[in-house]
Image (cartoon, grey):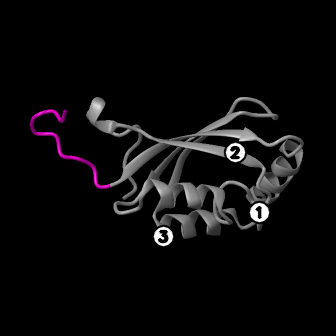
Amino acid sequence: MLQKGFLAMASKFFHVHHEFRAGQAQQWWDRAQAAMSPGGGWDEAVANNLEAGFFNHAFCPIGPEGPAYCIWEVREGITDVEFQEFIDGPNGVNFGLAAWMNICKEINTELVGSPPFPRKF
């Protein structure tokens, strides 16, 4: 139940649990590090995702073989199914490899009355 006077957020937040598929970890780290290096396209990808309505607030890898946990925010109107398709698709977290199995769960911000991070949308 919403607290009295609390305005519901227009965007949604998701917790994403990532597990590497067998034998995919090193290839994924190699691609991720190349993308994040100067000229690797990382800044452009972040800007394109933001424009499309997706923003990653936190990437929390536990170890080189996984798992990893992320907090993502999506713009109002994007469904849970559309977010899952984004995460698993070519602009999501896999760098074209299908390396991660991604389990996405919407965070119920009504339970705590505030988002986990300042909103981007």
Q: Is residue 91 visible?
A: yes
Sequence order check: which comes first, mark 1 or mark 3? 3
Give x and y (percent) for residue 97: 80, 58
In the image, 117 versus 11, the foreground residue is 11
Q: Residue furthest front?
A: 81
Against 110, residue 82 (above or below) is: below
Q: Main secondary structure of the magenta part?
A: loop
x and y percent of residue 50 in the render? 50, 64
CA–CA distance between discs 2 and 3? 25 Å
Amino acid beneath label 1: Gly
Along the horizontal axis of the image, is 65 left or right of 62? right
Mark in the foreground, 2 or 3 = 2
The image quadrant that residue 111 belongs to is top left
Q: Which span is picked out in magenta?
A: 1-10
Give the answer, above or below, for where 49 lies relative to 32: below
Kindly state the secondary structure of the residue where label 2 is placed. Answer: strand
Within 10 Å of disc 3 (Cα), the crowding (few <14, some 14-19, many 20+) is few
Q: Amino acid at mark 2?
A: Met
Q: Is residue 6 left or right of residue 60?
A: left
Q: Position of residue 106 (x, y in %)?
A: 43, 42
Mark with earlier residue (2, 3):
3
2 drawn magenta: yes
Relative side of 17 to 111, left or right: right
In the rendering, which numbered label is found on residue 96?
1
In the picture of the structure, the residue carrying the numbered disc 3 is 51
